[in-house]
Image: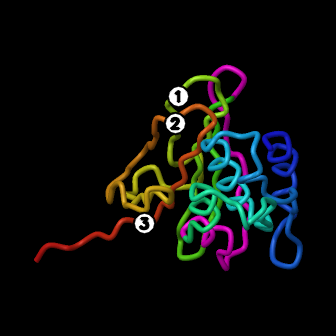
Amino acid sequence: MTYIADKNNKWASYAGPGGWDDPDMLEVGNGGMTLAEYLSHFSIWALMKAPLLIGCDVRNMTSETMEILSNKEVIQVNQDPLGVQGRKILGQGKYGCREVWAGPLSGNRLVVALWNRCSDTANVTMKLPAVGLDGYAAYSVRDLWKHETLSENVVGTFGAQVDVHDTKMYIFSPATIVASV
């Protein structure tokens, strides 16, 4: 799965409505990967706007598999009308195994995936300009796997502790500024 994601990443600039990259069907629920690896697989495929073709036996899927494959917020990233494929922005640490993937979404939003491909839990961080955001503006950050808004005022940098082979996925939206009277 990681090899295919890396291979597909180089074609991001050619993908879009009428011509999507197809890195192959999802292996979520087929065995051979941890729950964290399944979350990563689904997150990265959704961010890359890949066809989300279920590859497991739907008659016998676990509740965890069903929860991953039916996450409406992650599916909305995949189906975003802007139609721009996300891509790997940077790799950090030894072998570049702490990765930041990102892509623009409609409504002046941005999806960001912090992917820990390392063998240990790691902090994955980024400066907002590295993913195309204004480093001085405030952003609201929504966690797509927890289904909650984490902050309304992220400025400059952002990061999270990410478990081994896991991915955290967020949407950054311009923060709403309320003027005082």
Q: At x 68% / y 56%, what residue is drawn?
A: 42
**Label 2, label 3: how many angstroms apart (C-alpha)?**
24 Å
**Amino acid marked by disc 1:** Ala
Question: Quick one: 59 or 177, which is closer to the camera?
Answer: 59
Question: Quick one: 57 or 16, which is closer to the camera?
Answer: 57
Question: For mark 2, what is the residue?
Answer: 162
**Amino acid marked by disc 3:** Pro
Q: Nearer the viewer, mark 2 or mark 3?
A: 2
Cβ–Cβ under 8 Å for marks 2 and 3: no
Q: Nearer the viewer, mark 1 or mark 3?
A: 1
Mark 1 or mark 3: name the one nearer the start of the chain. Answer: 1
Q: Residues within 10 Å of mark 1 (few under 14, many from 20)?
A: many
**Amino acid marked by disc 2:** Val
Q: Position of residue 112 (x, y in %)?
A: 57, 53
What are the residue bounds of the magenta stretch?
73-96
> What's the mark number on residue 174?
3
Q: At x 57% / y 59%, what residue is drawn?
A: 63
Cβ–Cβ under 8 Å for marks 2 and 1: yes
Mark 2 or mark 3: name the one nearer the start of the chain. Answer: 2
- When the figure is inspected, residue 66 is found, relative to residue 159, above or below; the finding is below
Q: Residues within 10 Å of mark 3 (few under 14, many from 20)?
A: some
On the rendered image, what quadrant is the N terminus found in? top right
Question: For mark 1, what is the residue?
Answer: 122
On the rendered image, what quadrant is the C terminus found in? bottom left
Q: Residues within 10 Å of mark 2 (few under 14, many from 20)?
A: many
Q: Position of residue 9 (x, y in %)?
A: 81, 50
In screen coordinates, is 37 left or right of 5?
A: left
Q: Secondary structure at mark 1?
A: strand
Q: Secondary structure at mark 3?
A: strand
Question: Quick one: 7 or 178, which is closer to the camera?
Answer: 7
Q: Position of residue 90 (x, y in %)?
A: 67, 39
**Label 2, label 1: how many angstroms apart (C-alpha)?**
6 Å
